[in-house]
């Protein structure tokens, strides 16, 4: 079920009405479990059974880790949980990819092998709920979380519908404590949640789908060479589209949860105003970057090891981060590019961090735009369906096709330009504060005007229920 | 220097509870402190919510009034879900209409039902080639009904990846993969579209209005052709009827659409990145492959007891001249019937089918489509070898 669909509107109204009508906290939690499974099953009912089985297994394994005496026994149960989760993810998401690469490797040594094509349907949001569930056993093993006694609570923590299919990746340790005490209906909190939902839908329906996705799709789907302007316009359109699409989903999720009395953390913090790549990853898909930091980077030794090893750790983490997004080498290259950016930034810091000019506002602005440019270059690999397209796009962007084609209308170029300048200006204006603080500074009439504009724009735009990009992950 | 949290708390003047240290009881899971509870910006939210609701309702009502003042009325919009809904009605022995918008506009289901004894299922779609639907029906082992297939050469032979293919492939894919949520949205959407006039994605949406901005393009830019604006109504059975505003051939809307068809039906120049001779050879191969694929699909359906008849629906004016020039019937219609051994009805072969005028050169008016269908049914019965008494 998509947030930007009529079905969700009806579903949400029913769920939120029943939730606040029911008196008992246990009853409310039961309602949310049923609603979450309906939300998920509305996409493909059989996969709700898969979701339940992995959740139940992790619940049981979490208890075993909690009960186990000694570190090695705990580790055995943790390994079982990690293997179960990753094998599930591996089978559904990477099965065909692994077979294709195995075939390619055998062909390199002269063995011709034709693997069967597995007709596997990817369960929507499997990468997200696997991480929700995995965080539980990992945190119990790390000793920062005690196993919950309630299977129902754990099911809800994994499958809570606002964040189930496209994040943010909510850790069990952040959510389970919120299930201990009944949430209370606070009118201002509820209305702020609705405001966030409106903002999220505006970003998705108006900005991502209507103003940016068309030109981005045409540019990345074009089979011929393109001039620099169209190539850059396509990449900038995609940079805006993916931000508004994913940040829009996250804001909707946060807002929806808030109207039910639950608090989810920010997933984006004005990333296109990042100065440097470590700053970017503190602002982009924060729930994933902190997940990878806590459960992968730090266990690998983080930066408490020799510089070369620390750099290698970064690259490994970003390699796996890239692969998490999709079973294709283009995603791996995207991850490796970001890994390299992070390593280069560390090296530059060693040389230049203490220079007086490094903190100058102009240097920071230049560094910010350089970061944005490098992020856009990486987006080429993220969006291109293969390396031929990626290479053609990059050649076009750097002037390699002076006689290439122009395929965007002037109106589309203007649209992309205005939205891009707008998003960058907004991010730079608010980069050092939270969204809530920015709203707080506005007078009530301005909040009303902006809110009414966004709500009417959603109706006026007549969205087409396009799926969110991150659903495929 | 104050931390971000304390600074934030001060600025928001939030109650202490938002950033309190959790009690031992609250840490029962050993989880992190609850300091991530989201702050709510202090503002008169109730007043803001009421004001926004009033403004949005007023603006929506004004937009609806404006749409109706322009002559728009509530009607369903053509989309993948509505097509899927019709596709689900196909039974093993159904009569199915497939192909492009001419079959969509010109076929009157009531007249077909009267004449053929069974109500057909309308699967023809605007700007779509028949092939993906024909292929899908051929693959459906249970189907052994009757197919009435519209034939417009420029669209029928559309290559893979072109808009006429992509458009209908999406519909076929939606039919096979439609989720319960999409199905529910389809019914809710129909309910709304039946009541609200401004729900016209082609004309009255943000994108539709942006498309109308008179901004000139760069010289030499290979921009996509413009598509016609809204000019038809559609019902739950996907029966399209031309909007009265378009029925006058000298009216502004009809004239505007006439001028849109010409570039749409003119083959685009070959892509700059493929040598012309290779491109032309590829196009020729593509057409031959389409002939072969269609023949195989027709044979497959016929082997199960099914029937197919091809129909060339009327066109007029400059578009007729263009089509006759670019796609003469000797090069496509005749070979198609020859290869598939299927019957065909070319409207201009029969005086009773030839006298109709398409106001915007490509489709019949709602009234003419009824009369045309009544006359066409007699030819269909003959082509399908149906007993005269039925």
Image: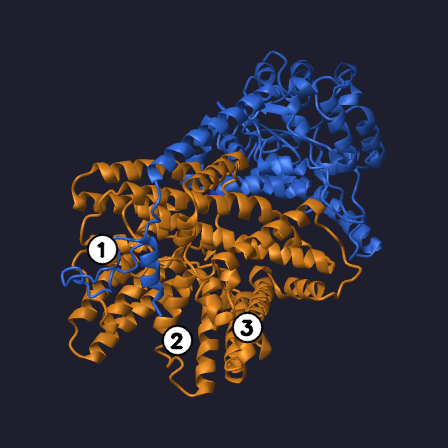
Chain colours: A orange, B blue
Q: Residue furthest left?
A: B25
Provide the secondary structure element on which disc 3 rests. Answer: loop
- Classify residue A444 by image quadrant: top left
Query: Which numbered mark, 2 or 1, is in the foreground of this view?
Result: 1
**Label 2 crowd bin: few (<14), some (14–19), many (20+), radius 10 Å:** many
Q: Quadrant of the C terminus of chain A?
A: bottom left
N-term-proximal mark, 2 vs 3: 2
- According to the image, label 3 marks what residue? A360
Give the alpha-carbon distance from disc 1 to disc 3, as whole Å: 39 Å
* Residue lying at the far bottom of the rendered structure: A306
Judge by depth and name the residue closer to the eye, B314 or A58: A58
Callout 2 touching callout 1 (CB < 8 Å): no
Q: Is residue B324 above or below residue B14?
A: above
Residue, x 52% and y 25% (percent of image)? B62
Disc 2 is placed on an element classified as: helix
Q: Nearer the viewer, residue B41 or B262?
A: B41
Report, in whole angstroms, how far the alpha carbon at label 2 lies from the one at label 3.
31 Å
- Residue bearing mark 1: B17
Q: Position of residue B311 (x, y in %)?
A: 70, 27
Relative placement, left or right, of A180 versus A406 is left
- Marking on residue B215: none
Q: Is residue A43 visible?
A: no
Residue at screen point 52% across, 32% down: B82
For residue B386, say whether it is visible.
Answer: yes
- Chain label for disc 1: B
Quarter the N terminus of chain A occupies? top left
Chain letter, disc 2 residue: A
Where residue A352 appears, as percent x and y from the top left, is 54, 82
Mark 2 highlights which residue? A297
Q: Position of residue A196 (x, y in %)?
A: 40, 46
């Amino acid at each position: 079920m998509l947030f930007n669909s009529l079905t969700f509107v009806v579903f949400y109204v029913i769920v939120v009405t029943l939730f606040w009508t029911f008196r008992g906290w246990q009853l409310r939690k039961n309602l949310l479990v049923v609603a979450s499974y309906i939300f998920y099953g509305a996409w493909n009912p059989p996969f709700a059974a898969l979701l339940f089985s992995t959740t139940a297994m992790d619940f049981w394994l979490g208890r075993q880790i909690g009960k186990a005496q000694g570190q090695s026994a705990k580790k055995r149960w943790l390994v079982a949980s990690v293997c179960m989760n990753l094998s599930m993810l591996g089978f559904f998401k990477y099965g065909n990819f692994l077979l294709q690469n195995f075939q390619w490797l055998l062909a390199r040594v002269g063995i011709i092998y034709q693997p069967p094509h597995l007709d596997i349907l990817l369960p929507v949001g499997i990468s997200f709920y696997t991480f929700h569930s995995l965080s539980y056993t990992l945190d119990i093993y790390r000793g920062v979380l005690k196993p919950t006694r309630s299977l129902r609570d754990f099911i809800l923590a994994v499958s809570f519908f606002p964040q189930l299919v496209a994040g943010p990746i909510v850790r069990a340790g952040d959510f389970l404590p919120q299930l201990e005490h009944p949430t209370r209906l606070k009118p201002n909190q509820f209305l702020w949640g609705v405001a966030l939902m409106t903002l999220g839908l505006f970003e998705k329906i108006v900005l991502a789908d209507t103003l940016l996705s068309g030109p981005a799709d045409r540019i990345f789907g074009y089979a011929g060479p393109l001039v620099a302007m169209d190539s850059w316009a396509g990449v900038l359109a995609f940079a805006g589209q993916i931000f508004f699409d994913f940040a829009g989903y996250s804001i909707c999720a946060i807002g929806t949860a808030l109207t039910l009395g639950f608090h989810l953390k920010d997933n984006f913090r004005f990333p296109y105003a990042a100065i440097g790549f470590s700053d970017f990853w503190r602002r982009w898909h924060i729930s994933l970057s902190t997940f990878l930091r806590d459960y992968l980077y730090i266990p690998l030794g983080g930066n408490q090891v020799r510089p070369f090893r620390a750099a290698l750790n970064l690259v490994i983490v970003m390699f796996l981060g890239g692969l998490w997004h999709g079973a294709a080498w283009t995603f791996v290259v995207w991850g490796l590019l970001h890994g390299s950016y992070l390593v280069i930034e560390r090296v530059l810091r060693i040389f230049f961090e203490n220079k007086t000019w490094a903190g100058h506002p102009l240097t920071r602005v230049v560094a910010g735009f350089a970061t944005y440019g490098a992020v856009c270059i990486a987006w080429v690999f993220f969006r291109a369906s293969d390396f031929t397209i990626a290479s053609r796009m990059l050649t076009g962007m750097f002037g390699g096709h002076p006689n290439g084609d122009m395929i965007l209308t002037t109106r589309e170029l203007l649209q992309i330009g205005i939205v891009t300048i707008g998003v960058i200006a907004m991010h730079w204006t608010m980069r050092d504060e939270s969204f809530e603080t920015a709203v707080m500074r506005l007078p009530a009439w301005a909040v009303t005007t902006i809110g009414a504009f966004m709500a009417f724009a959603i109706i006026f735009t007549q969205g087409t229920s396009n799926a969110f990009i991150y659903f495929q992950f | 220097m104050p931390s971000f949290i304390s600074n934030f708390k001060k600025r928001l003047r939030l109650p202490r509870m938002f950033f309190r240290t959790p009690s031992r009881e609250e840490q029962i899971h050993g989880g992190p402190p609850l300091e991530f509870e989201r702050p709510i910006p202090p503002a008169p939210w109730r007043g803001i919510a009421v004001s926004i609701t009033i403004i949005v309702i007023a603006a929506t009502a004004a937009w609806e009034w404006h749409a109706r003042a322009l002559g728009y009325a509530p009607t369903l919009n053509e989309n993948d879900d509505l097509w899927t809904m019709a596709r689900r009605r196909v039974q093993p022995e159904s009569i199915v209409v497939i192909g492009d918008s001419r079959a969509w506009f010109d076929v009157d289901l009531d007249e077909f039902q009267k004449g053929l004894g069974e109500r057909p299922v309308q699967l023809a779609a605007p700007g779509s080639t028949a092939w993906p639907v024909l292929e899908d029906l051929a693959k459906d082992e249970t189907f052994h009904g009757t197919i009435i297939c519209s034939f417009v050469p420029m669209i029928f032979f559309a290559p893979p990846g072109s808009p006429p293919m992509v458009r209908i492939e999406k519909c076929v894919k939606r039919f096979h993969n439609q989720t319960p949520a999409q199905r529910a949205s389809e019914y809710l959407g129909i309910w709304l579209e039946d009541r609200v006039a401004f729900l016209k994605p082609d004309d009255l949406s943000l994108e539709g209005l942006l498309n109308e901005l008179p901004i000139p393009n760069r010289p030499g830019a290979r921009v996509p052709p413009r598509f016609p604006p809204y000019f038809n109504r559609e019902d739950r059975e996907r029966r399209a009827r031309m909007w009265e505003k378009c029925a006058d051939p000298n009216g502004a809307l009809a004239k505007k659409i006439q001028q849109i068809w010409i570039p749409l039906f003119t083959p685009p120049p070959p892509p700059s990145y493929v040598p012309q001779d290779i491109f032309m050879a590829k196009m020729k191969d593509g057409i031959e492959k389409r002939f072969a694929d269609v023949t195989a699909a027709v044979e497959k359906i016929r082997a199960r007891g099914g029937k197919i008849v091809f129909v060339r629906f009327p066109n007029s004016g400059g578009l007729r001249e263009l089509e006759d020039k670019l796609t003469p019937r000797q090069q496509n219609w005749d070979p198609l019937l020859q290869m598939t051994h299927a019957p065909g009805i070319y409207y201009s072969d029969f005086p009773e089918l030839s006298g109709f005028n398409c106001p915007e050169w490509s489709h019949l008016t709602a009234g003419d489509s009824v009369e045309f269908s009544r006359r066409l049914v007699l030819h269909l019965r003959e082509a399908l070898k149906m007993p005269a008494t039925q």
